[in-house]
Image (cartoon, helix red, strand yellow):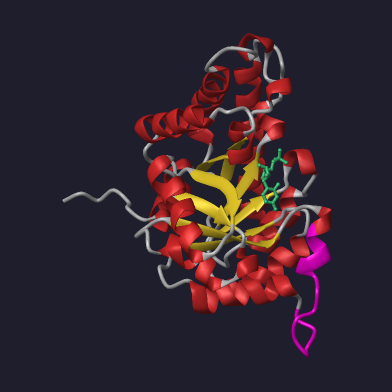
Amino acid sequence: MNSSPNTFTQQLQSAWASQGSMLCVGFDPDPKRLPTTFQGKPEGIYEFCREIADATADTVCAFKPQFAYFASQRAEAQLEKLVRYLKDKYPHIPVILDSKRGDIGSTADHYALEAFERYGADAVTVNPYMGFDTIEPYLKHAGKGVIVLCRTSNPGGSDLQFLNVSPNGEPLYLHVAKLAAQQWNKSGQVSLVVGATFPEEIAKVRAIVGEMPLLIPGIGAQGGDIDATVKAGRIPNKPSTGMIINSSRAILYASSGNDFAERARQVAITTRDALRAASNKSN
Ligand SMILES: O=c1ccn([C@@H]2O[C@H](COP(=O)(O)O)[C@@H](O)[C@H]2O)c(=O)[nH]1
C-alpha cells in the first residue's frame, strides 16, 4: 500500500511532523541581488534557487517560488525546471506557486492548468476579489491547495481589507475568512494568506477558520515578529502545525558572496529554531 501523502494538506501535515519546521523558504530571485557568479548566466536563476533549496531543504515545511521574479526575466522555463527539481529531489516538501491569480472562470481554468500542470505546483495563491466562480476552477484539481489572500502583509492591504462590509462592522478580510472556511472549502484544500505584520488579525482569522493552514509571509525582510505571529496563529494543543511561515529575501540574500548558500542555511536554521521556540512557548 502506498502511504505517501497525496493532498496538499496531507503533505503539509507530514512535512510539519517529519521536518519539525513551520518555515517556508521563498524563491524571489532578483537579478540585481544574485551573487555575481549567477548574473547573466543562461540558467543562473535556476542554479541559484537550486543551491538555496539544497542548502535549506532540511529546515523547511514548504518552498514558495514567486512567479513574477521568473516571468519578468523571461525565466518561466527555469521555474518549470526548478519545480521539477524540487519535486524529484524533495518529494516530501510541498511547493506553493505564489502567483495571486484572479479572473473569470473560463480564464481561471487556464491559470489552474498553468499552476498545477505546467509548473507542477502542489498549491497556488489566488486573489478572491472576483468571487467564488473565480476560485472554483482551482478546486476541481483534486488534492491541490488553493491559498486565498485574506489579510496581506503590506501596509496598503488595509485600504480594502479593513473596509466594513456588514452592519456589525465586520471587516472584509474576516468576511473572506468566513467565506473560505464555511462555503468555499469544498475540497478541504483551501488555506488563507495572513501577514506576519498583523498578528492581531492572524488571531482573529484563526478563531474563525479552526485548523485551516495559514500561509504567513512577513517575517524577515518585512520585520514581522516571530513570537507574536506564532502565538496568534497557533492551533491549541498542536504545536508546530497549522502555519507555513515564509521568509524569502532574508534567507536568499543573507550573503552576496561565495558563501551565499552556507549563510542562507544559517539564517534558515536560526529562523526555524526561533519558530520552534515560539511554538513551544505558546502551547
Ligand atoms: O501578503 C503577502 C502575500 C505574499 N507575499 C509574498 O511573500 C514573499 C515575502 O518575501 P520577503 O522577502 O520574505 O518579504 C514575497 O514573495 C511576496 O510576494 C507577501 O509578502 N505578503
The residue depicted at 38 percent of the width and 63 percent of the height is 140
Asked if residue 27 lies in the magenta stretch, the reply is no
Question: Quick check: is 163 in the magenta stretch?
Answer: yes
Residue at point 46%, 67% (across, down): 136
Classify residue 31 as left or right of residue 10: right
> x and y percent of residue 168 in the render?
78, 89
Whole-percent x and y of residue 195? 71, 55
Q: 275 or 258, which is in the foreground?
A: 258
Above/below status of 144 relative to 62: below
Q: Which residues are magenta?
A: 157-170
Q: Which of 116/52 is in front?
A: 116
Residue 240 makes an appearance in the image? no
Q: Quadrant of residue 258?
A: top right
Q: Quadrant of residue 29?
A: top right
Residue at 68% x, 23% y is 31
**Residue appearing at x 75%, y 53% in the figure:** 153
Is residue 71 shown above or below 279?
above
Q: Nearer the viewer, residue 171 or 243?
A: 171
Above or below: residue 220 compared with residue 208: above
Per the picture, the main secondary structure of the magenta-coloured stretch is loop
Q: Residue 128's x, y, as percent?
A: 61, 65
Quarter containing the C terminus? bottom right
Residue 180 seen in the current view: yes
* The residue positioned farthest toward the left in the image shown: 1
- Residue farthest to the front, as pictured: 106
Q: Quadrant of ligand 1?
A: top right
Locate residue 247, reporting x and y percent: 66, 40
Of 37 and 276, which appears nearest the observer?
Answer: 37
**Count of marks overlaid on the render:** 0
Q: Is residue 113 above or below residue 237?
A: above
